Amino acid sequence: MTTKADLINAIAKESGLTQAASEKALNACLKSIKESFRRGKRVSLKGFGSFTVVRRKEREAWNPHTGEKMIIPSKNVVKFNPGKMVKEVIGVEKMTSAL
């Protein structure tokens, strides 16, 4: 697992920025992505992939312990479509997942 601290360290190492500057840069990036999601906009990072907010429909399910039917309400989820670089790294032809 990679944590936010790991990302900050990697940014500092690769860019030559200080830890504090790297943390500010990462926080600004995450804030911008979050704001795009809030407005329902797609976030696309060429080569890496794109993140899209999609509406998951209401659906019927069953409680596995009781067998009782229940309705799972609709909600927004983030869908990730990997770019060429990610596909090459993980060796997958086609992958889509809801985060």
Image: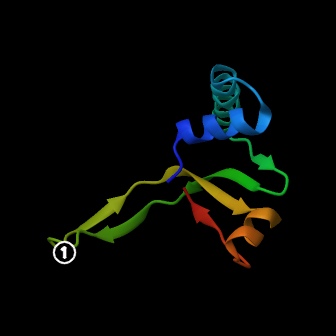
Residue ID at (69%, 51%): 51
Q: Position of residue 36 (x, y in %)?
A: 70, 36
Image check: 64 left or right of 77?
Answer: left
Between residues 36 and 8, which one lies in front from this camera angle? 8
Q: Residue furthest right?
A: 46
Label 1 sits on residue: 67
The residue shown at (61%, 40%) is 7
Q: Amino acid at mark 1?
A: Gly
Residue neighbourhood size for the residue with mark 1, other residues' Cα within 10 Å, grouped as few (<14), some (14–19), many (≥20): few
What x and y, as percent, mark residue 48? 77, 56
52 vs 62, nearest the viewer: 52
Horizontal and vertical percent position of residue 10:
66, 41
Frontmost residue, 82 versus 8: 8
The picture quadrant where one finds residue 83 is bottom right
Q: Quick check: can you spot residue 60?
A: yes
88 on left or right of 64: right
- Looking at the rendering, which quadrant does residue 15 occupy? top right
- Asked if residue 36 can be seen in this view, the reply is no
Q: Quadrant of the C terminus?
A: bottom right
Count of numbered labels shown in the rendering: 1
- Label 1 residue SS: loop
At horizontal 16% and vertical 71% (from top left) the residue drawn is 65
Give how far across and how far down residue 49 sits, in percent.
Answer: 76, 57
**Is 93 placed above or below 76 here?**
below
